[in-house]
Image (cartoon, rainbow, N blue to C red):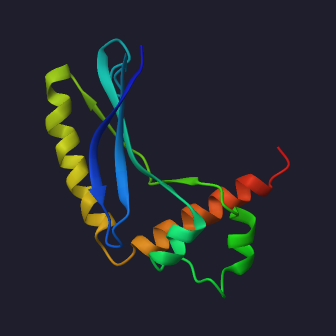
Amino acid sequence: MTESTIFDLISDRDGLVWQVVLTRHLGPARQRADKLVWQVHMHAEAKVTGALLVDSGTLCRSGDSRLLQILGNESIVLRSGEIRFEAIEEKQIPRSAVEAVVGLRKTLLSCVVKDIKARAVTRQVENLCSFS
């Protein structure tokens, strides 16, 4: 059984609030397939519109006009890279997750957050425009 929860909220450098989503399930250990451990996956995600991205300075109304036109008024979900770890006991998950959130918070407060958001928007637009 897989369980997902919102573990934390992080405001990035531009004021956008990201939800830290934690998903966990029991599965085989990476080092020993005969042993069950808690496999934990974490990522941050934020729901945004083109207008919000312009207001935060991530996109430029004139320079990114085509991209904004494709987005229209629709909301998209920006998603950070995934952090994975294992825990032998369930009670170890919160402590390890807090350590991972420290790294996520540091990234989202850094000056590269605009680049992260711009790449995430580009991925979303590519997915919207693909013929799959």
- Kindly indicate the quadrant of the structure image that contains residue 72: bottom right
> Can residue 85 be seen by looking at this rendering?
yes
Q: In this view, does 117 lie above or below 30?
A: below
Which of the 4 quarters of the picture holds residue 111?
bottom left
Judge left or right: residue 116 versus residue 65.
left
Question: In the image, is 57 to the left or to the right of 23?
Answer: right
| Residue 47 on image: x %, y % | 49, 53
Residue 38 position in % (x across, y down) = 29, 22
Report the residue that reaches farthest toward the right: 131
Name the image quarter holding the N terminus.
top left
Give whichever of 32, 17 is nearer the camera. Answer: 17
120 or 38: nearer the viewer = 120
- The quadrant the C terminus occupies is top right
Q: At 72% from the left edge and 53% from the top edge, which residue is drawn?
A: 127
Against 52, residue 64 (above or below) is below
Residue shown at 64% from the left, 56% from the top? 124
Q: In this view, does 98 lie to the left or right of 25?
A: left
Q: How many labels does the image show?
A: 0
Between 98 and 121, the one lying in front of the other is: 121
Q: Residue at x 24, y 50 (%)?
A: 101
Report x, y in % for residue 94. 17, 34
Nearer-the-camera pick, 17 or 29: 17
User: Residue 43: horizontal and vertical position, in percent?
Assistant: 39, 46
Is residue 118 visible in this depiction of the protein?
A: no
